Image (tube, helix red, strand yellow):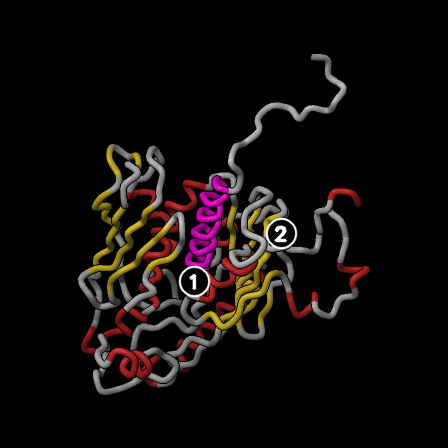
Amino acid sequence: MRGNSFGEFFTITTFGESHGVALGAVIDGVPAGLSLSEADLEVALGRRRPGQSSITTSRAEADEPEILSGVFEGKTLGSPICVIVRNHDARSKDYDPNYYRTGHADRVWQEKFGHRDHRGGGRASGRETLARVIGGVVAEKLIPDVKIVGFTRQIGPHRATTIPENLSRDMVDAHPTRCPDPAAAEAIQAALEQAKRDGDSFGGIVEIQISGASIGLGEPVFRKAKALLPGALMSVGAVVGVTLGDAHEDAQTRGLEFHQSAGGELSGISASANGIQGGITNGETIRLLVYFKPASTVGSMAKEGRHDPCIVPRAIPVLESMCALVMADLALAQRLDRAFACTEPEFSGNSEV
């Protein structure tokens, strides 16, 4: 099978199955000299790992990373980095090889390949996403000035309306729902706990804000930043839609209202472009909305098994990582945009020689 690698200049290849020995990632295109440790990876994986609270699966995995290659004395070597995470709490007996779960990839995988790992969905399991988080840690080392923060905007009917300024991951992680609006967070938690008892599930919306990106990332034709970011996010299981900004609202807004300048009329920078103009970043904050379907496991299987009643809270670190992978790839690609960089002041015609 193909499709296990992502990126052009900064690339990640993920491997492993939900109930296999281990999962992991091989990351290539990483410059030498970046600081990287297993402790860095542990922090990020801890934000995604199962068993965090009453509204997540009870599968107990420590998700301890092991760096196998590409790092020496705490610094990247420039060679491929391989990291694995071993599985310890798989319960394969919970899965019937003759049963296809509706809403999962079981049936289509069988039809496509003729052979599948039925244990927990195998490679199609959401557990695969831990490898993306590993890649995201390394990617963020390459783009230290770029800040990527995702948060729960809505789950079921409960929507966050009061969002703090200068939002940080610590602020988002302060509540298990990852919703920074206290009133909405409490309502969401109660709804998810009830859904877990009922064997029901919810979908939701995540908002991602990317700030600090320089002007000029992305291409004007096929490798548009506005295409690569949604494409990366759509590769995450249970994601059913991604928009740059609130596309539904923008589509109903008059042009005179929508096309407002940022930084003065002559700046050429749009305040309403959500950070991307002509497929290229404009230096403003990039805002994305990511839509999730209700979690696929419902009914008696949800009551008896170990499943999330909503994917949204644990998916947020994964979405942030996918954005980091794209931004790091675009940052490396930008080095090829010009034959040389001019570091001298531009000649104005008024200077004396």
Q: Is residue 195 above or below residue 31?
A: below
Q: Is residue 6 visible?
A: yes
Q: CA distance from mark 1 to mark 2?
A: 23 Å
Choose the circle earlier in sequence order: 1 or 2. Answer: 2
| Residue type at tag 1 | Ala
Left-right relation of 55 to 15:
right
Q: Is residue 325 magenta?
A: yes
Q: Is residue 263 left or right of residue 123?
A: right
Could you tell whether 218 is left or right of 282 in the image?
left
Answer whether labels 1 and 2 touch (C-beta < 8 Å): no
Query: Where is the N terminus found, in terms of image quarters?
Result: bottom left
Whether residue 179 appears in this view of the structure is no
Looking at the picture, how far across and down is residue 234, in whole percent?
46, 66
Instruction: Give coordinates of residue 195: x percent, y percent.
Output: 44, 77
Counting from the top left corner in percent of width and height, residue 119 is at 23, 74
At horizontal 24% and vertical 66% (from top left) the residue drawn is: 17
Q: Which residues are magenta?
A: 313-336
Nearer to us in this view, 228 or 345:
345
Placement of 107 over or under 21, stated as above or below: below
Report if residue 72 lies within the magenta region: no
In percent of the image, x 51 and y 49: which residue is there? 148
Q: Residue at x 21, y 61 (%)?
A: 87
Q: Could you say which disc has been placed on residue 315 in the image?
A: 1
Q: What's the amino acid at mark 2? A: Gly
Taking the spot 58% from the left edge, 74% from the top edge, the residue there is 157
Secondary structure mostly seen in magenta is helix
Q: The residue tagged with tag 2: helix, strand or loop?
A: loop
- Does residue 16 sit above or below 166 in this rendering? below
Q: Which residue is mark 2?
A: 275
Tell me where residue 299 sits by quadrant.
Answer: bottom left
Crowding at dot 1, Cα within 10 Å, few <14 / some 14-19 / many 20+, comes out as: many
Q: Nearer the viewer, residue 13 or 21?
A: 13
